[in-house]
Image (spheres, helix red, strand yellow):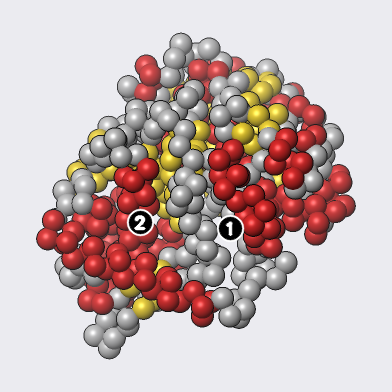
Amino acid sequence: MQYIISLDIGTQGTKCILFDTNMNMVADAFEVSNLISPKPGVVWQEADEIYGSCVRTIKEVMEKSQIAPSDVCSIGIDSQSAGIMGVSADGEASTYYDSWLDMRCGKYMHEMQERAGKRIIEICGGPASYTHGPKILWWKNEQPEAYAKTAKFVLPSGYVVGKICGLRGEEATFTHTCIHFSNFGDNLKKEWSEELLDLFGVAKEKMARIASSFEIAGTTTAEFAKQSGLVEGIPVVVGAGDTAAGAFGSGIIEAGMLMDTAGTASVLCCASDEYHPDTEFETLVQMPSPVEDLWHPLAYINGGGLCIRWFRDEFTGKPAASYDELMAEAKDLPAGSEGILFVPHFCGRVLPNNPYVKGSFIGLDWKHGRGHMYRAVMEGIAYEYAYYFSILKKEHQSTKFEKLYTTGGGSKSPLFNQIKADVLGIPVVAYEQGETALAGSAIIAGCGAGVFSDYKEPMKNLGKEGAAFQPNMENHEKYQKYAEQYLNVISALEPVYKSGVYEIEG
């Protein structure tokens, strides 16, 4: 039997799973991330800690499984997608990882939006936000020494792949599944846009080579083998962004399929065989799938899932209440939480971009308890999804969306799933393969190394549809009013937050 190692470098932590070639999970390991956040709006991770977490979790799954290291046939890696970091000529880190949660590049985000907003969307498939383009301009202008030392800008996965394989900076790769976040890449051509790079004065030489997720980037070195407990010469693929890997691992590969990633970020996306940049609403991002000529129009809330954990950790005592306890308090409350609205944009609204929004509870009354507030947090995320869904239906009028597949930690909550079904008015189906990104990365690795002849066969051995939640249409009608009020609240609060009190310093 052969085995595949799959790594997911997430915001909250690094997870490693060892799969056999029948896509059975043999062993897993997890290490919590060290997010460095000295003040609001500033978030980064040290590159060596990211790489170290990958080494340690691989070593742990090998020790747990007791398989022969020579039986590992390939390694696949996915990572958080909207942040960026640099590597120097020798392939070592030239910067820390500038997280997608970091807002210091806001000045350059506005500059890119003002100078080429819709053109960036047309070419890249997504707007300039707290994404690669503004972050690279921040490094160039605010940290010129680090910028000068940087040979290539890469994703965390690109950095780790380079370290595992001993690649030099000039050999670094950039997965094509993250072009939509680059702000400098041509989504259709899968190449860097000289038009956009020239406009903003970024040298093309600073950008890593765009490559297919399935391409073999290199093989494990003797040094890495010694660190991790593996052997030298194992093929390592370029890999994918975490959301792209999750959609792929969920089997979202046919036009019209709709998926909710209920993780640290709350992501609503679908599959489409047409590239349709959203220049009208500037809300949907066209994420390329690992599958050729397939895209995933999507929108997301920065830290949507974090809002739920934040409420539990900060407002339910010490030790914190369990999610089951909170669900019991909230599940029988009426739709709308008896007048509370919650805005989940703690780091600003990403899509459509509005940095002048913060997290808020609106409409609190003496009658409200923590069950009301907990339910309102979930409803606020669902209201944001309702807006995304309305744009999806306008942009893809010929597509019929019949049900929503939900994955990630939030998909384990029956209440959250029911709220989404009621707000959106379509069935929500929990996908029982919980580690969809890791499964997707494993299949990509197996295909790249020639272990699988194509991706469809191993997908048959993945998860299946679990519990289905049918929409309560009476609640759906009620929720339409609340979803509209939610959008009105965001507009009404904008002047308050735009006053400068909440401005993030560089």
Residue nearest the observer in this picture, 181 or 366: 181
Relative side of 379 to 11, left or right: left
Residue nearest the observer in this picture, 18 or 198: 198
Relative side of 182 to 469, left or right: right
Please identify the quarter of the rendering in which residue 218 is found: top right
Give the amino acid type for the residue marked by disc 2 in the picture.
Answer: Tyr
Relative side of 486 to 231, left or right: left
Residue density around tag 1, few if under 14, some if 14–19, many if 20 or more, within 10 Å: many
* Residue at 50% in and 47% down: 279
Residue 287: image location, x then y, percent: 50, 38
Q: Is residue 357 above or below residue 389?
A: below
* Residue at 50% in and 13% down: 451
Please identify the quarter of the rendering in which residue 256 is found: top left
Number of marks drawn:
2
Q: Quadrant of the C terminus?
A: bottom right
Residue 481: image location, x then y, percent: 24, 67
Q: Is residue 75 visible?
A: no
Residue density around tag 2, few if under 14, some if 14–19, many if 20 or more, within 10 Å: some
**If you read the primary sequence from the N terminus, does the residue marked by circle 2 or circle 1 appear first?**
1
Question: For the residue labelled by badge 2, is the local secondary structure a helix, a strand or a loop?
Answer: helix
Residue 476: image location, x then y, percent: 18, 59
Residues under numbered marks 2 and 1 in contact, where contact means CB atoms less than 8 Å apart: no
Q: Is residue 446 visible?
A: yes
- What distance separates the C-alpha of mark 2 from that of mark 1? 22 Å
Q: Residue 381 got which mark? A: none
Judged from this view, the residue extending furthest toward the bottom is: 366
Front: mark 2 or 1 = 2
Q: Label 1: which residue?
A: 101
Q: Label 2: which residue?
A: 387
* Residue at 42% in and 57% down: 305
Relative side of 98 to 316, left or right: right
